[in-house]
Image (cartoon, rainbow, N blue to C red):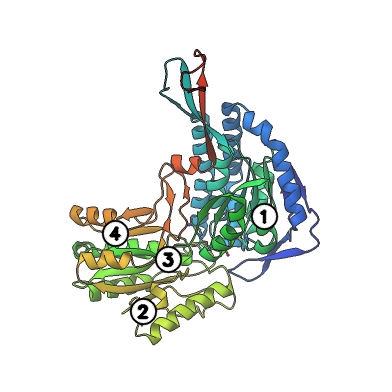
Amino acid sequence: MTDMWINGKKTRGVAREDIPVLNPATEDALGHAPRGTGEDVNAAVEAAQAAFDEWRFMPAWERANLLHEVADKIHSHFDELAILLTKEEGKPLPENEEELDWTLNTFRYYAELGRHDRGRFIPPGDPGQINFVIKEPYGVVGCILPWNYPLLLMAWKVAPALAAGNTVVIKPSELTPLSTLRLAEIAFDHLPAGVVNVVTGYGPEVGEALVRHPDVRVIAFTGSVATGQRIASIAAPMMKKLHLELGGKDPMVIGPDMADEMDMAVRGLAYAALLNAGQVCTSTERVYVHESMYATFAEELAAFVSGLRLGNGLDEGVDIGPMIEERFRSKVERHIEDARQKGAQVLVGGGRATQFERGFFFEPTVLVHANHDMIIMREETFGPVIPLMPYRDFDEAIRLCNDTDLGLGASLMSRDARLVKRFFENVKAGTIWINDPLTDNYAGPFGGMKMTGGGRELGQEGFDEFCEVKHVHWDIEGGVKEYWYPY
Ligand code: NAD
C-alpha cells in the first residue's frame, strides 16, 4: 500500500479501503492506493491553505530554486519512475522516458518563468500617479488528472501553479495513482509542508469534494468532456475559476502532394494515431486522404501498421502497449462494429490481440470507407484505430475537419504553402501541426477550442491561467480632485 501525501507527510488519512491498481499488460495487481474521502480532501486543503502565505511571499528566486530541485530529484530517480509508469499505464518504456523528460523540464521551464514574470507597469492617467498590474496567485488549486500521462499532465498544472505562488492539492486518476504518489515522496519532500498534497481516490468522492470545497478557488482538470461538464456544473454557483482540458477528435489531412512522399505521410500518421495505443487526447482519430492517392495510401498504411509490434511496454522493440482497461477496449470494439455495419472495411487488425493470454491488448487497426455517419468519425474513440476517408478538394477537407464539437488539435501533411496557410487559418483547433504531428513546445500553448474546454497549458498562457490580475492605481502627488463632489 502506498500512502497519500498530505502536509509534507505520507499518510493513510482516514481512508478505510484501498483501490487496487493493475498492470494493464498483465492484469496483475501492481499495488494499492488509499480510497481517500472528503475528510482527506479537507485535511489536504487545510494544509495547502496554511502553506499559502509563506509560499506566495517567498522570493521568486528561492521558489525557482525549489522547483529546479523537483526537476533534479525526478532526474535522479528517472529509471525507477519510467519503469513504474510503464507498469502502471502500459505504454512502451521509451514513451514513458519521454514523459519524464517533459515532466522534469516543465518544472524547469516554469521555475524560470515564475522568477521572471510578476505583472506589468502601465502608463498612468496623470504624471503624479503610478499604475501597475500585479499577477497574483489564487490560493489553493485543485488539480484533477487522467491516467494517460499521469506525471506529464500533473507537471503541466502543478509547475505553473506553484511558480505563480499557488499551493496545490492533486487528485490523480484512480487507475494510475502510484507514480504520482512515488514522485511526491521523492521530489516534493523538500517543499514547505502543505505546498503540494496528493489525495487518491475516486472522482465522485475525492474529485467532487475538491470541486465543492470553498477554499479551492481554481480547478485545473484534464479528462473527459462528461466529467468536465459535471465539474463545471458544480463549480458554477461558486464562480470558481475552471481550467478545463477535455477530449479531442483530432483530424489529419493528407495533402495531394504527399503522393510523392508517401512514406513520410504513412509513418507520421501511424505515430500520431497509435502512440500510447491511441490513448492520447491529441491522437489523430480521423484521416482525410486526397482521392487521387486514397487506395495506394491505404495499402501502404496497412502494410506499415501490420509490421508494428504489440506487447508489454517493458520489452525491448515493442511499439505499442496495451490499452489501460477493459471498458476502454470494449468502447473501441463498439466503434469498429458500428463502422463495419455502416460500410467500413477493416484492412488490418480490428479486434483483440489473441496472442496474449492476459492484458488489455487491441490490434492496431486500419479502416477504409469511413464516413461521418459512423460513430468512429464523430466521438472520441481513444484507441489504436485509424479510419480513412477520401476527400475531393481542400475545401471539403477543411469542412470535414471542422465537422465536430471538439477542437483540440489538427494535423496536415503537405509541403504546399498555400494549403498550409488555408489549413491553419480555417481549421478550428488549439494546435495545428504541419508535417510533425503531436510535437509540443514548452513555450507554446496547448489546449482546445469549442467543447474541448478552452484551457491552455504550457507557455506564458499556461502560467497566466494560475494568476489573477490586480490593477493598482496610486495617486502619489495629487490632492483633492476637481471631478469629486460637489459638482
Ligand atoms: P475522466 O474524465 O474519466 O477522469 C479524469 C479524472 O477526473 C480522474 O481523476 C477521475 O477520477 C476524475 N473524476 C471523475 N469523475 C469526477 C467527478 N464527478 N468530479 C471530479 N472528478 C472526477 O477521464 P479519463 O478517462 O481519466 O481520461 C481520458 C480523457 O481525458 C479523454 O477524454 C481524453 O481526451 C482526456 N484528456 C484530455 C487532455 C487534454 O489536454 N485536453 C489530455 C489527456 C487526456
Residue 121 falls in image quadrant: top left
Q: CA distance from mark 2 to mark 4?
A: 23 Å
Residue located at (76% from left, 48% from top): 43
Image quadrant where one finds the N terminus: bottom right
Q: CA distance from mark 3 to mark 1?
A: 37 Å
Which residue is labeled 4 in the image? Answer: 412
Q: Is mark 2 within 8 Å of ligand 1?
A: no
Q: Does residue 187 appear left or right of residue 248 in this picture?
A: right
Q: How many marks?
A: 4
Residue 158 shows in this picture: yes
Q: Are marks 1 and 4 in contact (CB under 8 Å)?
A: no
Q: Are marks 3 and 2 in contact (CB under 8 Å)?
A: no
User: Could you tell me residue 146's position as x and y percent?
Assistant: 57, 59
Q: Is disc 4 surrounded by few (<14), some (14 to 19) or many (20+) residues within 10 Å?
A: many
Q: Are marks 2 and 4 in contact (CB under 8 Å)?
A: no
Q: Is disc 2 surrounded by few (<14), some (14 to 19) or many (20+) residues within 10 Å?
A: few
Residue 290 versus residue 366: which sits nearer the camera? 290
Residue 194 shows in this picture: no
Q: Are marks 3 and 1 in contact (CB under 8 Å)?
A: no
Which residue is labeled 1 in the image? Answer: 212
Q: Are marks 3 and 4 in contact (CB under 8 Å)?
A: no
